[in-house]
Image (cartoon, rainbow, N blue to C red):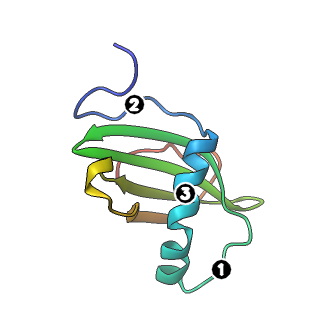
Amino acid sequence: MWGPNLGGFSDTQDATAEIQAIADQVKSQLEEKENKKFPVFKAVKFRSQVVAGMNYLIKVQVDEDDFVHIRVFESLPHENKPVALTSYQTNKSRHDELTYF
């Protein structure tokens, strides 16, 4: 079977332009929660999970050696809802494994 397994997360993959666009859509939500601006916000890795929509775990580089893990939910297209930041972890490193949180 190609792609993510229903119910489980896919293997970690390099981020694509589509994943960067999803991360960009929740950047302001994270900045508001952390009360700080991220001049760098580069998606580098991701995992995805098919649910009633799509969950993403995304590793985002926010400084040279500083990373954030974000969990994002993208609803089904017919629901016409914005992408939502559902959880995040700060103070991550380039080598921290991208696991569910």
- In the image, residue 48 lies at what x, y percent? 40, 39
Q: CA distance from mark 3 to mark 2?
A: 18 Å
Say whether marks 1 and 2 touch (CB < 8 Å).
Answer: no
Does the rendering let one see residue 91? no
Q: Which element carries disc 3, helix, strand or loop?
A: helix
Tell me which residue sits at (55%, 46%) in the image. 19
Q: Which residue is mark 2?
A: 10
Residue in the image at 21% along x and 44% along y:
52
Could one spot residue 24 in this view of the protein? yes
Residue 13 as seen in the image, left or right of residue 87: right
Q: Secondary structure at mark 2?
A: loop
- Camera-near label (3 vs 2) is 3
Q: CA distance from mark 3 to mark 1?
A: 14 Å
Mark 1 or 2, nearer chain start: 2
Seen as rendered, the residue at the extreme top is 1
26 over 47 or under it: above or below? below
Label 1 sits on a secondary structure element that is: loop
Mark 1 residue type: Lys
Question: Is residue 93 found left or right of 63 in the rendered image?
Answer: left
Q: Earlier in the sequence, mark 3 or mark 1?
A: 3
Residue at which label 3 appears:
23
Q: Nearer the viewer, residue 66 or 48?
A: 48
Q: Is residue 96 above or below residue 1?
A: below
Nearer to us in this view, 82 or 62 = 82
Q: Which residue is mark 1?
A: 37
